[in-house]
Image (spheres, rainbow, N blue to C red):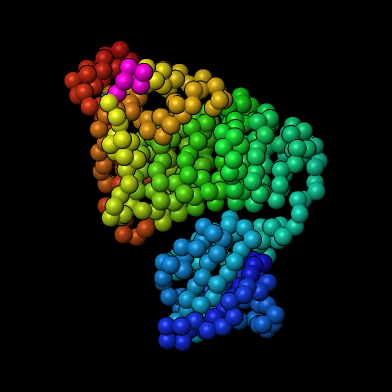
Amino acid sequence: MLFQCGANVRTIRGQRMIGPDDFITSTVWIKKENNYYLCLKNSIYPNGKTYRISYVKMDPIFFSLVKMGKIAFEFKKPREVFSIEFESKRLAYVFYRTMMDIIDGKNVIIDTNQNPDALHANNAAIDNFDLNATELKVVNSFDNRILNMKCLSTLVLEDCNSLVLPEEIGHLPIESLNISGSEMPTSQHAKDIYWNWISKPTISYTLRTLKMDSIGLTRLPFEILYLKFLQTLSINNNLLEYLPHFIGELTSLKHLFLADNMLVYIPHCLSFGTIAEMDIIHNCFHSTEPYDHLITYKENIKNPTDFKLLKHIAFFKLMGNFPKLKRQDIPRPLWEYFNYVGRCANCRRWTLPDYSRTTRIKFRPLIKKINMALHLYEEGPTWQLMYCTDKKDCDAHKKYIRVNC
Ligand SMILES: [Zn+2]
């Protein structure tokens, strides 16, 4: 593992940090001899400087910078603060996860070769547009020539600035798409059209792996619902406060990576079904002030009006028969309902918080491979369920389903 980055070393004396505060172009890597070591080489330390990783003083403040592409470690021996500034937030995250795994006592395998990601990040786009290629890795920006690669099955678009994926990319038979580290555009229009490629018949049929680590995602787009054959979804290191319950509709999903978000609950529908591997480490399951997006929605419900009721009916109809539509084809007031819709855990009908109550339970799911904080191992993470408020109607519907299906 080798990273090109900016580095700064300051000495701690008492409560003060002494030394220059500028970042110098450096090479940083992790090596394993009997222990794990963090190594640094730059113009100040031309012969290199080595820290034993077990001497890192665990201070959450030093790790909290990672979403800005920076990490700082305080070492007990020597008493120094070592700060690193990465060009790409994705690389900062890769580095941070490796360090955390080592500090947590996991057996991390260190690749002795140079990290190709680190090298590519410093190069311009790889100028290799063989139109018959099946794989392509591009760093920095999207190139419209990609749209002519009709055999493309693996596309990596890492660390692109304000990446906008043209809708036409959905016409390519892509099986694996990785946009990690490519921050989303900020303008409302660009955000609105960002996910239109997903609804195209070709890609919605072919896509098996979607990686979107470190892209600043605050909400999971409902267009993911079109990816019926998706097996791997990686959304590590984003800004997700909750996962919408519609994620349970992805019935082919086997590998789900949700580490380093701000999740307080996981939809209960994910605890059964096809998931074989899940990573939920570094979330907020033990938050003292848990944010429940469904309850917050319910608290804000003003007196329902006929108009609102009509919107709900239209929305349930849409969920029942989900046609391939672009976001713009659905009235904007309905968009937000995707964040709050879920199936009743009893009768399995679609419901909204207007017609349901929310409960939470803790348990360890029967998922073969699950990576979570050690303190969760006994009782497991918190799962969120929705139940119809009208219990009589709910039970009647359940009975009806049993008899007729
Ligand atoms: Zn129900």
* Image position, residue 221 (x, y; %): 50, 36
Q: Position of residue 200 (x, y in %)?
A: 61, 26
Q: Does 287 sit left or right of 338 as displayed? A: left
Residue shown at the point (77%, 50%) measured from the top left = 126
The answer to if 403 sits in the magenta stretch is: no
Q: Say which quarter of the image contains residue 313.
A: top left
At x 18%, y 20%, the residue is 392
Q: Where does the magenta region start and end?
A: 304-309
Query: Residue 115, how many percent across, how many down?
Result: 66, 62
Image coords of residue 287 (percent x, y):
31, 54
Q: Is residue 307 above or below residue 54?
A: above
Name the foreground residue: 299 vs 40. 299
Q: Is residue 195 visible?
A: no
Q: Quarter-wise, where is residue 47 in the image?
A: bottom right
Relative to 5, residue 236 above or below: above
Q: Is residue 60 left or right of residue 179?
A: left
Farthest bottom residue in view: 13
Task: Please state, as top left, top right, bottom left or bottom right, where the N terminus lies in the image.
Answer: bottom right
At 46% from the left and 29% from the top, the residue drawn is: 335
Q: Residue at x 59, y 66 (%)?
A: 85
Q: Is residue 149 above or below residue 62?
A: above
Q: How many marks?
A: 0
